[in-house]
């Protein structure tokens, strides 16, 4: 059974700092990996999706990398801003056989960026 | 990106009543929709997966008679919580996926259900 771990559960950094959020998963046979952002009381916003054949994806100040063989992904946030404060969730598709592929989520990292 | 809406965003109901939550894909056809439940400070728990026109596939431990899911069209899925109890109070989130090869899922804004 796929398990996704995100450590630490919470992180507080000063504004402007570059930071790395880590995600690990137990079964390397994944189809893709997604990073999401969730604000309190809100749904999920997809940040980046990395296919299993890819090593990284970039969007603005965000860069996500994937090392499938070691079961790890990182989300790099450059020059953090108070508006980046949210919970960041990592999720993997563990079944690539078709229509009922499922996302397995980590518990998320709650990030607080101090002005 | 693709947009998924949910209605209502918040609902309060009395114990024993039923509540329906709608999930719509606004600008794409969702061949598959998913319903999740999220407890405070916990990760999302997949409740069921539904393909348009087919019966939903429920995850282990989820009561299919209590959580009725209908996916009658490519843009609409509904979750009905029947005979709601206070322990059903939670944040329910739907997501939708099109037929593209990326299998990217798009999430709705969630519905906060409170059962009194």
Image (spheres, coloured by chain):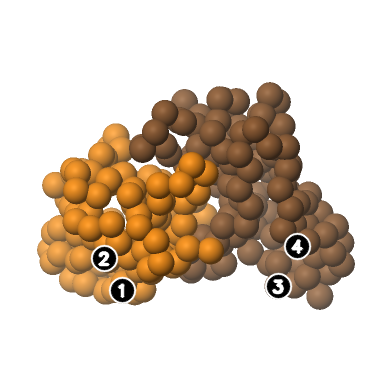
Chain colours: A brown, B orange
Instruction: Give how far apart the Cα atoms at labels 4 and 3 are.
Output: 14 Å
Q: Are marks 1 and 3 in contact (CB under 8 Å)?
A: no
Mark 1 vs 2: CB contact within 8 A: yes
Sort mark 1 into few (<14), some (14-19) or many (20+) by Cα contacts within 10 Å.
some
Q: Which element carries disc 1, helix, strand or loop?
A: loop
Q: Are marks 4 and 1 on the same chain?
A: no
Report helix, strand or loop for mark 3.
helix
Element at label 2:
strand
Contact? badges 4 and 1 (CB < 8 Å): no
- Image position, residue B48 (x, y; %): 30, 45
Name the residue tied to disc 4. A60
Q: Which residue is mark 3?
A: A83
Residue of label 2: B21
- At x 52%, y 55%, the residue is B41
Say which of marks 4 and 2 sits in front. Answer: 4
Q: Nearer the viewer, residue B1 or B86?
A: B1
């Amino acid at each position: 059974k796929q398990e996704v771990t995100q450590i630490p559960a919470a992180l507080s950094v000063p504004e402007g700092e570059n930071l790395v959020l880590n995600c690990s998963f137990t079964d390397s046979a994944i189809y893709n990996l997604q990073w999401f952002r969730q604000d309190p009381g809100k749904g999920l916003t997809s940040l980046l999706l990395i296919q299993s054949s890819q090593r990284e994806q970039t969007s603005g100040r965000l860069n996500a990398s994937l090392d499938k063989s070691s079961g790890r992904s990182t989300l790099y946030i450059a020059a953090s801003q108070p508006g980046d404060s949210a919970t960041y969730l990592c999720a993997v598709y563990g079944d690539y056989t078709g229509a009922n592929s499922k996302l397995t989520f980590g518990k998320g990292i709650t990030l607080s960026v101090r002005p | 990106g693709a947009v998924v809406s949910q209605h209502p965003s918040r609902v309060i109901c009395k114990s024993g009543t039923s509540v329906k939550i709608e999930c719509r894909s606004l600008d794409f056809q969702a061949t598959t929709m998913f319903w999740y439940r999220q407890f405070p400070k916990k990760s999302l728990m997949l409740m069921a997966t539904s393909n348009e026109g087919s019966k939903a596939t429920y995850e282990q431990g989820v009561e299919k008679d209590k959580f009725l899911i209908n996916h009658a069209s490519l843009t609409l899925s509904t979750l009905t919580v029947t005979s709601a109890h206070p322990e059903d109070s939670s944040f329910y989130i739907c997501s939708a996926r099109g037929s593209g090869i990326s299998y990217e899922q798009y999430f709705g804004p969630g519905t906060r259900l409170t059962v009194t």
